[in-house]
Image (cartoon, rainbow, N blue to C red):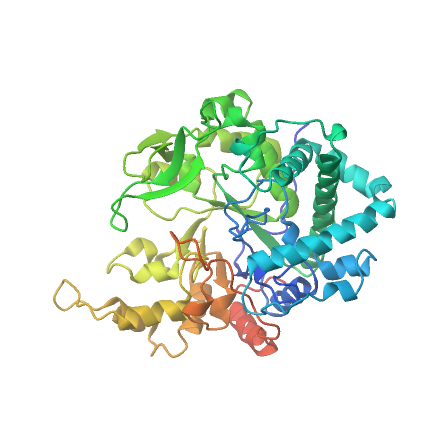
């Protein structure tokens, strides 16, 4: 039966604006942000500021370093985001249990300490849920039945992973043991069902609250999935693996002016013929899950739907890969046939081929423009804000960029002279283009984004606050110190909301 076609309430076809903030960065007393009071206050801020969108990073279950792009499942929710305050409200935790044994930093996420505290409290809540007959609740049974295709394998994956003390699945001695015959596995299986049910309940409540106030949620979907994930473990035929389960080919990008050896990302490549043979069933289920959580989705590395850089599995750099064509057009056609038109942002940053652009335009997806990129090269019309097409999303920066304040300070300190005589340095080009002294460069950039022809403008919260390099979310190609920044309670003031709303009104981005 074809899907019911309705005009989307939240659409990139209208001029609007929003903010980028990952939920772990929200304020709160339990080590990281979550779906509790801090999230609802942030929605209130966005509504007061006339913002249409709240964009996040991926919200799947992360490894111990909190990296959201290395989730253990493309379908499950991150249990770290479950609100402990809501569990206490529901009688599953006591108020005394909400206080950590030692104080948690309000400004940075200590992932090991936060994971230990939150998972301990979540297990206490699970025990009380079970004792109170929670598994017999109709809502729980409905969730487990509806989401069984991904939920049951994921619960078993988590159970086996705990039995094997977190080791990658390729090192497991136990194969798919019968859960009913192993008490530890059975208990862990049930705990995962409880955690995912709780996440889903809390997420749905927050989304309703946001939508009722005119705020839509934008999710983020990495094109690849982690090798150490339930998806690869449960569906090995869909990935290019050897007999031992190791990647025969891995993801990455070729050498360029920034890296002589390229970038080796390390995800297993897909066996695209197998996906075609199944009618892209796994992909369609993945997108259906995403759009059950979000009003719109950004596809990370959309260029990979045209071609991918496939690196030999044993390679230590990305130098000796090869380009492989991908049936992205077939997949996206199947997606549209199954789910109807959806609001999708195509992350098309990097070396863009005409064919990848044609694929994006064929489906009408807005691409991305980053304001910082406008000043990398003089005369680069593609990234000039005044020349943006309406069907794009402009960002002052992303999670991979420095903050606007930190970026300008780096340009100011760069004393290298331009190669062409009489040319301006990037720092001087910024000041000339904006007609500014740079004293409030973050607000200059916010005004520039909102004034641009782009239908959608998204600003990281760090730029709303004018924070420097210390607030950067991620430094690509590094593994330490990332994803830890947190917003402090009270930083997003009514004055900031009013100033942002005035700009949204001035540039036609308020939606009645």
Q: Quadrant of the N terminus?
A: top right
Between residues 33 and 438, which one lies in front from this camera angle?
A: 33
In the rendered image, which quarter is residue 437 located in?
bottom left
Relative to 281, 210 lies left or right: right
Residue 432's spot in the image, x, y percent?
28, 72
Residue 211 higher or lower than 192, as above or below:
below
Residue 77 higher or lower than 189, as above or below:
below
Relative to 419, 487 lies left or right: right
Between residues 136 and 245, which one lies in front from this camera angle?
A: 245
Q: Residue at x 24, y 46 (%)?
A: 260
Report if residue 252 is visible in the image: yes
Q: Quadrant of the C terminus?
A: bottom right
Residue 435's spot in the image, x, y percent?
33, 75
Between residues 228 and 388, which one lies in front from this camera angle?
A: 228
Report if residue 336 is visible in the image: no
Q: Residue at x 61, y 29 (%)?
A: 174
Residue 262's spot in the image, x, y percent?
30, 43
Total marks in image = 0
Residue 402 higher or lower than 316, as above or below:
below
Between residues 344 and 404, which one lies in front from this camera angle?
A: 404
Residue 149's spot in the image, x, y percent?
67, 31
Q: Residue furthest top?
A: 277
Residue 5 higher or lower than 436, as above or below:
above
In the rendered image, which quarter is residue 453 located in?
bottom left
Q: Residue furthest left?
A: 421
Relative to 84, 164 lies left or right: left
């Amino acid at each position: 039966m074809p899907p019911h076609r309705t005009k989307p309430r939240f659409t990139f076809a209208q001029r609007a604006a929003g903010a980028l903030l990952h939920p772990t960065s929200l304020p709160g007393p339990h080590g990281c942000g979550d779906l509790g009071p801090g999230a609802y206050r942030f929605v209130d801020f966005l509504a007061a500021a006339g913002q249409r969108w709240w964009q996040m990073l991926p919200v799947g279950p992360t490894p111990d370093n909190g990296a959201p792009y290395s989730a253990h499942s493309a379908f499950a929710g991150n249990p770290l985001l479950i609100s402990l305050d809501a569990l206490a409200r529901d009688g599953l935790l006591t108020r005394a249990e909400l206080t950590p044994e030692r104080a948690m930093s309000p400004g940075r996420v200590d992932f090991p300490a936060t994971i230990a505290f939150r998972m301990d409290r979540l297990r206490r809540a699970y025990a009380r849920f079970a004792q109170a007959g929670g598994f017999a609740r109709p809502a729980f049974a409905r969730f487990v039945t509806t989401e069984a295709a991904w939920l049951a394998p994921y619960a078993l994956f988590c159970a086996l992973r705990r039995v094997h003390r977190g080791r990658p699945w390729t090192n497991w001695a136990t194969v798919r043991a019968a859960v009913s015959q192993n008490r530890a596995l059975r208990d862990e299986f049930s705990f995962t069902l409880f955690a995912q049910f709780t996440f889903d309940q809390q997420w749905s409540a927050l989304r309703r609250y946001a939508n009722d106030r005119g705020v839509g949620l934008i999710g983020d979907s990495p094109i690849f999935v982690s090798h150490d994930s339930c998806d690869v473990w449960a569906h090995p035929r869909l990935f290019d693996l050897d007999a031992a389960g190791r990647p025969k080919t891995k993801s990455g990008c070729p050498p360029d002016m920034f890296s002589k050896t390229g970038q080796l990302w390390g995800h297993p490549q897909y066996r695209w013929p197998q996906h075609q043979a199944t009618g892209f069933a796994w992909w369609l289920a993945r997108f259906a899950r995403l759009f059950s959580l979000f009003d719109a989705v950004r596809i990370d590395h959309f260029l990979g739907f045209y071609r991918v850089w496939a690196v030999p599995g044993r390679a230590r750099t990305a130098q000796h890969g090869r380009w492989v064509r991908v049936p992205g057009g077939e997949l996206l056609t199947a997606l549209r046939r199954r789910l109807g038109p959806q609001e999708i942002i195509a992350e098309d940053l990097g070396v863009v081929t005409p064919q990848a652009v044609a694929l994006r335009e064929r489906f009408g997806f807005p691409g991305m423009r980053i304001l910082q990129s406008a000043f990398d090269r003089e005369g680069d019309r593609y990234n000039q804000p005044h020349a943006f097409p309406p069907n794009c999303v402009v960002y002052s920066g992303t999670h991979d960029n420095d903050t606007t304040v930190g970026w300008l300070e780096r340009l100011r300190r760069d004393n290298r002279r331009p190669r062409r005589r009489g040319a301006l340095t990037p720092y001087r080009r910024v000041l000339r283009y904006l007609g500014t002294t740079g004293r409030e460069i973050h607000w200059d950039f916010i005004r520039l984004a909102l004034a641009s022809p782009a239908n959608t403008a998204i600003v990281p919260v760090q730029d709303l606050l004018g924070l420097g390099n210390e607030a950067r979310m991620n430094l690509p190609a590094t593994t330490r110190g990332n994803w830890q920044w947190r917003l402090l309670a009270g930083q997003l003031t009514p004055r900031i909301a009013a100033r942002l709303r005035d700009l949204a009104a001035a540039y036609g981005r308020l939606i009645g």
